[in-house]
Image (cartoon, rainbow, N blue to C red):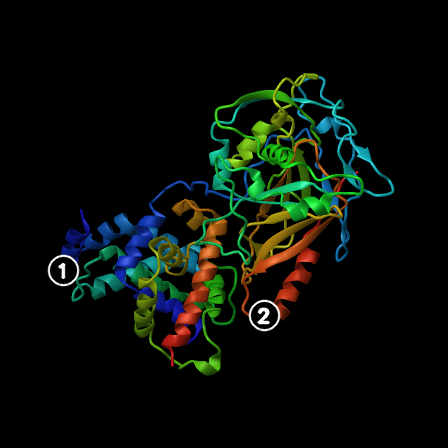
Amino acid sequence: MNAKTLLRGFSEIDPRYLEAAMQAGADAEGEPETGAKAHAKSPPEAEAMPVVTVHRNVGKRLRIAGWAAAAACLLLVGGAMLHLRQSAKENVLIPPASQDDLYVEITGTAATALTTVSAQTVTTHTTAAGHIVSTAGTLPPEDEFTPSEPPQPAFTEGSTAAQTVLTQTAVQTALTDGETAPSAETRATEDAGVHPFRPGTAYAGQMPVLVAMADRSGTLPGGMQFEAVNDAQAVLQYLAGDDPAVTVGEGQKDSSTADFIMRSPEMLRVCWQTADHRWEEYGVQSAVLDADGVLHLSVCMYSGGGQTETAPWIYETALLFAGGSMPAIRDVQLDLQYFEEQNGISQWLAFNAALQDDVQIQYAQ
Amino acid sequence: MDDCEIIELFFQRDERALSETSGRYGGMCCRLAKRILGSQEDAEECCNDVLLKLWNAIPPDRPQRFAAYLVRVVRNTALDLYEKLHAAKRGGTQTAVALDELAECLPAPDDVEEAQSAAETGEMLNRFLADLPDQTRNIFVLRYVYLMPVKDIAAKTGVSVSKVKVVLHRTRNALKKWMGGEIP
């Protein structure tokens, strides 16, 4: 049999299958094309904001050269300023030196926050530096994608983050000389702060904003963008599958809420696309920040069988950090976590090498 | 006029059967033919050939499902014309892409019997398709029967393009494994 015979063979399949597909495809005369639910979401209105991306040389390790002052990129509602400290030596992304630099008013309720988070898979762990890191990826339904490693169980309403976050081992690892392990009560409080949303709770307060939204349109030249969103409502929207817009409050507001507001998660959203469409990527992506400040991004790749598409696909993931503890990101590395290919390790290596070549990370000064 | 009445016109050798068929299904046939052939002119030529073939085939055929019968005739006619026109080269059409994709489903040449007929292949595909979930089957059929582009499949079925690609890829792999068992 050859491919032509196989293609012709499709003409002879059961007519019921033809009709069912015809109905599903609704190939009606003059029917307008409707937009598909796409993983590449339409970007927020961000034309006034400079794109902040990270650039690396092809085939070399990614480096973050530093952040440009991005005052013009904030959604300005009077008085909001962005301060970023750049380390010339270390080339790191470092949060503002103090929370006096910038504040955002956050108001809203989190009536469905826990439910929404439960619908996502949140992988949480503690780095050796003591940062509590969570990742919330957008998982396709199980029948679409089987990850090579099962994700951590999601938060469920009423559970404390201690079940998945801090362990005794991790706490010990995080300690430096002279520090003592937090008491169980303290730990529970800290754990609760990692996942602070409580149904029906109104909250207001101030949180530092690191970077505003960046353009994620389909016309991206092929790059990776970081956007640190420290707006609780935006985080909620993101977890709900929406495309949140960051809003910046006017001036500085005094915090007048419970501690968990200040420990509300910060979200670092990372999105990227492949410039070369030889490789198609799909499925969940994950991000992990290790003790050295290296951001590991995992993608799932498979060969598209030669089919090319003209529109680049933009994929994103997000990291949630405990409020006020956004760690320094010193480097970024792309890891091929999973691939679908039948030819074993040689193909895996080929995929991995191609991945490094194809994904262009651009950093704007 | 419904499909039964159109078929009755064929049996009565009433030429209104052709105009009714064209009016009811002309757009669909032309779009399918164009996807296969890549050219509006060739598609129109194909559709004219299809009407002639219908006139000659009905009677004695009395299709129970006229739309599906029509799809088969259009498809086979367009593929015949495609082979004639593209004997030397192929590319740039959904047919070429579909052929590349389906080539992945075939076991290694030395494991395969040669020259299976389309009818036998169709029966084999039916057995494969019967076990698929409805949505997967629909997407697979839309791609390889109707040669609908992936983006159009996504738009029409209301799923993401990524999902369509995933479904097609996995189903092709499943077909490849399945055919490895079916073909001695």
**Mark 2 falls within which chain?**
A
Q: Position of residue A83 (x, y in %)?
A: 77, 28
Image point (68%, 22%), residue name: A76
Q: Secondary structure at mark 1?
A: helix
Marks 2 and 1 share the same chain: no
Any part of residue A336 in sight = yes
Q: Which residue is mark 2?
A: A344
Neighbour tally class for label 1: few under 14, some 14-19, many 20 plus, Cα within 10 Å: some
Looking at this view, is A246 or A49 the one in front?
A246
Image point (63%, 70%), residue name: A346
Report the side of B60 relative to A244 (left or right): left
Image point (47%, 47%), residue name: B160
Q: Is residue A111 above or below residue A142?
A: above
Q: Position of residue A19 (x, y in %)?
A: 28, 54
Q: Quadrant of the C terminus of chain A?
A: top right
Any part of residue B27 in sight = no
Please tell me the numbered disc located at residue A146.
none
Q: Is residue A259 above or below residue B141?
A: above
Q: Position of residue A73 (x, y in %)?
A: 70, 29
Image point (57%, 48%), residue name: A311
Q: Quadrant of the N terminus of chain A?
A: bottom left
**Mark 1 falls within which chain?**
B
Q: Which residue is mark 1?
A: B11
Give the amino acid type for the residue marked by disc 2 in the picture: Gly
Report the side of A139 relative to A191 (left or right): left
